[in-house]
Image (spheres, helix red, strand yellow):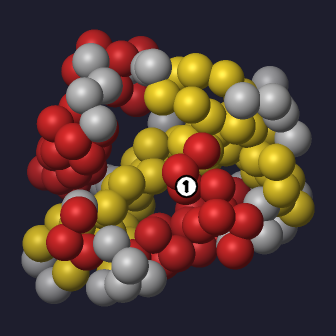
């Protein structure tokens, strides 16, 4: 499996397709909340298994801090290390861009995954798109 930083229209469509499948269809997040105004300014990542897109994520700068967002993997590729591969690539990118700290808003059901990657909880629980989340951070 290989993570690509999106560099063309097809790769961006692949990222949006994965996000739509996972967040809109599976988790019932309204599409207008999932594909948002921040997509125009974010760096997008797509995980490919051979030529098939199976995971995605994005990275952006928020108030001077690196923020990892929209991490998702198609159901049939979960528990294969795919999410870890995406996170490693995004963290490498962030480090190369000069960030030493990154944060993310984790769905509470995903907290164990991010904890295994070295993230620590720094907020109380809150709702985002009707789904419970907590903010987490990691020094990279």
Q: Image point 82% across, 48% down: which residue?
A: 121
- Of 79 and 44, which appears nearest the observer? 79
Image side of residue 126 versus residue 83, left or right = right
Number of residue marks = 1
* Residue 3, image x, y percentages: 38, 73
* Residue 128, image x, y percentages: 53, 22
**In the picture shown, does residue 85 fall above or below 30?**
below
**Residue 67 quadrant:** top right
* Residue 44, image x, y percentages: 41, 48
* Residue 135, image x, y percentages: 74, 38
Q: Image point 25% across, 28% down: which residue?
A: 28
Q: Image point 60% across, 44% down: which residue?
A: 108
Q: Image point 70% across, 74% down: which residue?
A: 116
Image quarter hosting the C terminus? bottom right
**In the picture shown, does residue 107 fall above or below 83?**
above
Q: In what element is the residue under mark 1?
A: helix
Label 1: which residue?
110
**In the picture shown, does residue 116 fall above or below 39?**
below
**Residue 40 quadrant:** top left
Q: Residues within 10 Å of mark 1 (few under 14, many from 20)?
A: few
**Residue 99 quadrant:** bottom right
Residue 45 seen anywhere in this rendered image of the structure? yes
Residue 35 seen anywhere in this rendered image of the structure? no
């Amino acid at each position: 499996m290989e993570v690509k930083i999106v560099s063309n229209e097809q790769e961006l469509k692949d990222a949006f397709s994965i996000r739509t499948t996972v967040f809109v269809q599976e988790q019932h997040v309204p599409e207008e909340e999932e594909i948002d105004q921040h997509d125009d300014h974010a760096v997008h990542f797509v995980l490919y298994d051979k030529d098939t897109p199976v995971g995605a994520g994005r990275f952006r700068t928020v108030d001077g801090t690196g923020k990892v967002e929209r991490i998702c993997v198609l159901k049939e590729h979960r528990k294969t290390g795919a999410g870890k591969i995406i996170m490693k690539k995004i963290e490498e990118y962030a480090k190369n861009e000069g960030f030493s700290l990154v944060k993310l808003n984790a769905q509470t059901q995903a907290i164990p995954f991010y904890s295994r990657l070295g993230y620590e909880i720094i907020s109380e629980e809150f709702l985002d798109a009707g789904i419970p989340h907590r903010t987490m951070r990691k020094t990279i």
